[in-house]
Image (cartoon, coloured by chain):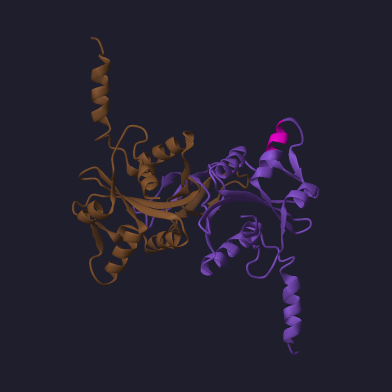
Chain colours: A purple, B brown
């Protein structure tokens, strides 16, 4: 059987829509793209782990045999884009109508608001997996909805993401071009 | 016996000179000061660890019983100061005359140079423990000495830190006020 290039392309194109990649994988691949194309330097921070016991004193051959996950003190991603400080948190939700704020640690929300106050660019990326839709929401709106959650609704509605946020289209490379939106905002 | 406040102060003042704090502890305390005084948001990144095995599926009660240290992809510290992106690496050396460049991973040096290229503020902090002297050296000089190391000297001389860098005086709070220097440079 002959593999027609056009057919391959077509199947490839539909592929990345339901490719089952996690948001983290998409963002990491996007950040790699930004780095190799000299667009931005944005990295995911390592997951904070409290090491309790290590088997060998030599670090090169050290085996950690007792450790625990600890609560992160900041967000997962930060870096620099066009000289600006960038900071964001990324989350997926299977919820079909809203994003529960409890999915983000409170101190991470406060960190994002604080970054904005210090002149940085901060936001959240939220993927609604039911629709494979990824939204960027600036932290000024996150702040607004966070304040609302004190007395009212504890989540951000999908319709609010549609109204106040930006839809990031999936593409091949970069997979989730969130800096395109940031570039338009700044 | 009466405790004279002036005596206490005096002993306190001499205390912090040979207090045996590591550079990391000093920087973390300084960053805490910056954060609580709303001066800057700078955090140490967690040490990257590759987790091989976790005992319980529930993350809250998870015990990691097999893991390894992995090479960090960037520097230890980054954040935002006056809207600017800040990035640096901190090292101690017991060497009395120079700082060996092999003490910093090559890709960390390249990362610092790249940050500068993208309009960020990047530098190294190096403490010569023999004299308890801490220097800040901007990455443009680090780049210069790194290039030199390709064909010549593989270290940065203490005299070069004195000439091209800035001495950060120890103090009580913040312990190592490196942003004071940065504020003068920018």
Q: At which x and y percent is residue B177?
A: 36, 40
Locate residue B74, reporting x and y percent. Answer: 45, 57
Residue at position x 34%, y 63% from top? B143
Question: Relative to residue B90, is residue B156 depicted above or below?
Answer: below
Residue B138 forms part of the magenta stretch: no
Rendering quarter of residue A185 = bottom right
Q: Which residues, given as a range, are shown in magenta?
A: A146-150
Residue B104 in the figure: left or right of residue A78:
left
Q: Is residue B15 above or below residue A119?
A: above
Q: Is residue A174 visible?
A: yes
Q: Residue at x 20, y 45 (%)?
A: B130
Residue B46 visible, this angle:
no
Magenta stretch, main secondary structure, is helix
Residue A149, compared with residue B72, is above or below; it is above
Is B71 left, or right, of A116 in this rendering? left
Estimate the x, y position of residue B56 in percent, counting from the top left. 60, 46
> Who is closer to the viewer here, B38 or B98?
B38
Seen from the viewer's position, the closer of residues A178 and A30 is: A178
């Amino acid at each position: 059987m002959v593999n027609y290039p056009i057919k391959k392309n077509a199947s490839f194109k539909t592929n990345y829509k339901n490719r089952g990649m996690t948001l983290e994988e998409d963002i990491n691949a996007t950040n790699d793209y930004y780095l190799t194309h000299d667009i931005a330097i944005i990295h995911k921070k390592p997951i904070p782990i409290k090491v309790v016991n290590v088997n060998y004193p030599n670090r090169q051959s050290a085996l950690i045999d007792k450790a625990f996950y600890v609560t992160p003190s900041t967000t997962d991603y930060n870096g620099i884009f066009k000289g600006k400080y960038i900071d964001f948190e990324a989350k997926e939700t299977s919820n079909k109508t809203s994003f529960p704020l409890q999915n983000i640690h409170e101190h991470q929300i406060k960190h994002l608001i604080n970054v904005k106050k210090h002149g940085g660019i901060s936001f959240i990326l939220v993927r609604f997996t039911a629709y494979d839709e990824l939204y960027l929401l600036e932290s000024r709106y996150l702040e607004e909805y966070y304040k609302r959650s004190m007395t009212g609704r504890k989540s951000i509605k999908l319709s609010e993401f549609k109204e106040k946020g930006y839809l990031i289209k999936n593409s091949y490379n970069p997979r989730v071009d969130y800096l395109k939106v940031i570039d338009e905002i700044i």
